[in-house]
Image: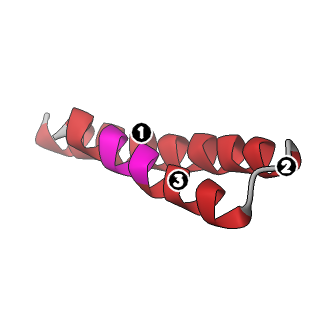
Amino acid sequence: MLKKQQKMIKISQKISILMSEKISVILMNKGFCQKYGKSSISIKIRIEITKYK
């Protein structure tokens, strides 16, 4: 049961990283600077990881 939970957390973290990268790329394409895009990635990942702890 614990292994299944750990696997789900790993998958959800990978998904959140992919989603946040996609969001930051969209922001950069709309004319935001690269720094803003990178900061949004780290904030998004922190939110996702704390949600699953």
Of labels 1 and 3, the one closer to you: 3
The amino acid at mark 3 is Ile
Q: In the rendered image, which quarter is residue 8 located in? A: top left
Question: Residue at the location (67% across, 40% down)?
Answer: 23
Q: For residue 44: magenta? A: yes
Q: Which portion, as a residue range, is magenta?
A: 43-48
Q: Secondary structure at mark 1?
A: helix
Residue 12, labelled with which disc? Answer: 1
Q: CA distance from mark 2 to mark 1?
A: 29 Å
The image's colour scheme reads secondary structure
Quadrant of image for the C terminus: top left
Q: Position of residue 4 (x, y in %)?
A: 25, 38
Q: Are marks 2 and 1 in contact (CB under 8 Å)?
A: no
Residue at mark 3: 41
- Dot 2 or dot 1: first in sequence order is 1
Question: Residue at the location (85% across, 49% down)?
Answer: 31
Above or below, comparing residue 25 to residue 23 in the picture: below
Q: Nearer the viewer, residue 46 or 35?
A: 35
Residue at mark 2: 31
